[in-house]
Structure formats: structure tokens, C-alpha cells
Image (spheres, grey):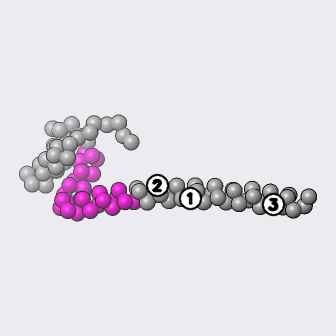
Amino acid sequence: MGKGIRYSEEFKQEAINQITIHGYSVVDVGSRLGVSTKTLYAWKSRYSKPQAKREEETDLRAELARLKRELKRTTEERDILKEAAVYFAGESKHATRS
């Protein structure tokens, strides 16, 4: 995760309001607030959407992250079970040959 400055949601929204509502350019707002234009464009794409849409996207991202963690854990469990099956199959062959 980045080690940059963490801005509040209100700060981000106000910065975007200066661009979208008040008509200031991204460069002007960025230089006044000390924020890069790249960051402002990212905020603009996020905060120019309605609140309900942003919350839905946040929920979807959280669900996607949860599912990725669960898939990783399940894949690791499957791999462990495969290794155990190979091990025990080898053990049973050695036990029947004696």
C-alpha cells in the first residue's frame, strides 16, 4: 500500500466540487491543494458518481477481496489434500507388498 498522505473523504469531495461545480481546472486545484493531477483525476472518476453508486462499488470491491482470499485458502487446502493423497497412496502400496 502507498505511503502517501491520507486525505479525508470530505477533502477529496471538496476538491472535486471545485473542479465539477465551480469550474476550476484540475491543474489549478492540484497546485492550490498540493495534490497531483493524476490523483485528482482518480478522485474525479470516483467522486463524480452518486453516493449510492460509490457505496455499491465499495461493497463489490470488498466482496471481491473476500472471495479472492477464500479462493486462495481453498486452493491451498486442496493442494495439501492432493499431497496427502499421493503420500498415503504411496504408503498403502508399500504396506501391501510386504
Q: Quadrant of the C terminus?
A: bottom right
The Cα–Cα distance between marks 1 and 2, rounded to whole angstroms, is 10 Å
Q: Which residue is mark 1?
A: 75
Is residue 75 in sight in this rendering? yes
User: Magenta region: which residues?
Assistant: 37-64
Q: Position of residue 43 (x, y in %)?
A: 24, 51
Instruction: Judge the density around disc 1: few (<14), some (14-19), many (≥20) Cα neighbours within 10 Å.
Output: few
Secondary-structure class at tag 2: helix
What's the residue at 69%, 56% (across, down)?
83
Three-letter code, disc 2: Arg
Q: Is residue 42 magenta?
A: yes
Which quadrant of the figure contains the N terminus?
top left
Q: Can see residue 23?
A: no
Residue at 16% in and 49% down: 13
Q: Nearer the viewer, mark 1 or mark 3?
A: 3
Q: Amino acid at mark 3?
A: Ser
Q: Position of residue 45 (x, y in %)?
A: 24, 56
How many C-alpha atoms fall within 10 Å of the one at disc 2: few (<14), some, or many (≥20)?
few
The earlier-in-sequence mark between 1 and 2 is 2
Q: Residue at x 27, y 51 (%)?
A: 42
Q: Label 2 belongs to which residue? A: 69
Look at mark 3 in the image and give the residue it sits on: 92
Instruction: Check disc 3: other Cα within 10 Å, few if <14, some if 14-19, many if 20+.
Output: few
Left or right: residue 20 versus residue 98 is left
Left or right: 45, with 17 as reference point: right
Q: Give the vertical position of 9 relative to 95 (above or below).
A: above
